[in-house]
Amino acid sequence: MTALYNDIIFGPVHSRRLGLSLGVNLLPTSSKLCSFDCIYCECGWNAEHRGGARFNDRAEVRRLLEQTLRRMVADGTPPDVITFAGNGEPTMHPDFEGVIDDTLALRDAICPAAKVSVLSNATRIGREEVRRALLRVDNNILKLDSAFDPTVRLINNPGGAYSVEEVVEQMVRFEGRLIVQTMFLRGSCGGQTVDNTTDREVEAWLRLIDRIRPRQVMVYSLDRDTPCQTLEKVPREELQRIAARVEALGIPCSVA
């Protein structure tokens, strides 16, 4: 079943992509707050978890993160990565840049070998303060699930205006200092066919990847419960074929 993260600091968990990951949730702990409403979101539909739009306090995030990092280091199990994820889109936090500043300072002081990662849907990367913060973290991981606006609306359900072209233009501005993450899936949802693995979809997506030139691409498929129960996982062999096409562009690509 889909579920929310009920704590500000959660885990650590063994991430398929990042290693031993300590999670940081900047969103409310009892509701979901996101600029997307993805049909595959492990936290469920936005409408199922409505509540106050109260973000977690910057000072409290810092206090709890420091406490947890010191305990993990003392136990001999420091995290490989500190990952901003949780109940929605982390860059929506009004003091996201300040939280990143705090996190980098704590990381440097307590467990300097750990990486700092942000999992973002890229809807706010046009904001200069968000861009500055993302340029400072080790793993700036931005979502791009399709090259086509109608497919994005079907899979990601963006709130308000959304344009793949505008998002890609902002991604290009990072000059390679980003990781593009793409969920491949097929099936149906709400009576509509879902499939971003067709030749048309993959070829258009590859053209955008070549234009963005990220330092890495991550492709993956379903692994956890989803709010839409009629989606299908893409076989690893198929993901590997897509990854090989990315690597033919001279861009490293991991499969999870």
Image: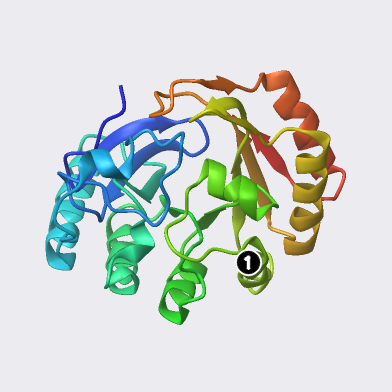
- Residue 23, how many percent across, how many down? 31, 44
Identify the image quadrant of the C terminus: top right
Residue sitting nearer the eye, 27 or 99 = 27
Res 224 → quadrant: top left
- Residue 251 in view in this figure: no
208 is higher (above) or lower (below) than 81: below
For label 1, the SS is: helix
250 is higher (above) or lower (below) than 155: below
Q: Residues within 10 Å of mark 1 (few under 14, many from 20)?
A: many
- Residue 197 in view in this figure: yes
Q: How many marks?
A: 1
Q: Residue furthest bottom?
A: 128
Q: Amino acid at mark 1?
A: Met
249 is higher (above) or lower (below) than 212: above
Measuring 33% from the left and 52% from the top, which residue is drawn there?
A: 111
Measuring 68% from the left and 56% from the top, which residue is drawn there?
A: 215
The answer to whether 170 appears left or right of 213 in the picture is: left
- Residue 205, how many percent across, how many down? 75, 49
Which residue in the structure is indicated by mark 1?
Answer: 171
Res 176 → quadrant: bottom right
The answer to whether 72 appears left or right of 229 in the picture is: left
- Residue 83, how many percent across, how many down? 38, 48
Identify the image quadrant of the N terminus: top left
Measuring 54% from the left and 63% from the top, which residue is drawn there?
A: 162
The answer to whether 171 appears left or right of 129 in the picture is: right
Residue sitting nearer the eye, 13 or 187 = 187
188 is higher (above) or lower (below) than 84: above
Measuring 30% from the left and 62% from the top, which residue is drawn there?
A: 103
Q: Residue furthest front?
A: 191
